[in-house]
Image: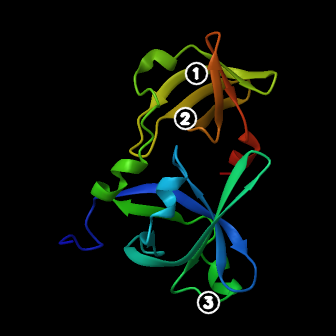
Amino acid sequence: MNQDANTPGFVQVGHVERSHGLEGEVKVFFDVDDPQKVEELKLVYLRNDRGDFYPARIMDFRVEGKRNKISFFVQFDHVADRTGAEALKSKGIFLEAEEAEPFVYAEAETDDSLVDHEVYDGDESIGLVVDVMNNPAHPILVVATTSGSRLIPYIDHFVEDRRDGNIYCQNLDELEGI
């Protein structure tokens, strides 16, 4: 690869949710439609506090499924303890643009056909889609609610179903405070 890590050309494909255990393992959320794509990853990029990208080799990787939710646990080669893992909390995980192509959510609609759809969290209406932001990793729904706008990534993890002209969401509590 002839690009150095300081040049543009990186696409965010996920983020570190939190540390897990004492050995430096982290729980990671990947913005993918097919979890098997993640299992093939050996190298990702993280960003330091200055905003520079640096490579992070994946030493160990495991997938855990609970309550219809898939969790990814990753051990990076440069993180050996919980303190190092805590330092990665909420950090984005990136791939070089050409490597990220399979990770881009292919089924999402990127045009305005989602505008004016009612959005539900379970049985409760939370608002109306007023715009769709085109993000390199996946589209993001801009939902007008009674308390302002809300951004919802248009991926399977958050958008459960689309029927009857409505969008039904799940796991929205994970977006609180982001």
Identify which residue, 98 or 141, lies in the foreground.
98
Residue 142 in the image: x percent, y percent?
A: 56, 30
Identify the secondary structure beneath mark 1: strand
- Tell us which disc is closer to us: 3 or 1: 3
- Circle 3/circle 1 CB separation < 8 Å: no
Query: Alpha-carbon neighbours of circle 2 within 10 Å: few (<14), some, or many (≥20)?
Result: many
- Circle 3/circle 2 CB separation < 8 Å: no
**Residue to which mark 2 is pinned:** 154
Query: Alpha-carbon neighbours of circle 3 within 10 Å: few (<14), some, or many (≥20)?
Result: some
Q: Residue at x 62, y 84 (%)?
A: 84
The quadrant in which the N terminus is found is bottom left
- Inspect the image, locate mark 2, and give the three-letter code of the amino acid beneath it: Tyr
**Residue to which mark 3 is pinned:** 80
| Vertical position of residue 177 compared to residue 168: above or below | below
Residue 105 in the image: x percent, y percent?
A: 45, 40
Residue 112 as seen in the image, left or right of residue 28 = left
Sequence order check: which comes first, mark 1 or mark 2? 1
Residue 120 in the image: x percent, y percent?
A: 73, 23
| Vertical position of residue 122 compared to residue 32: above or below | above
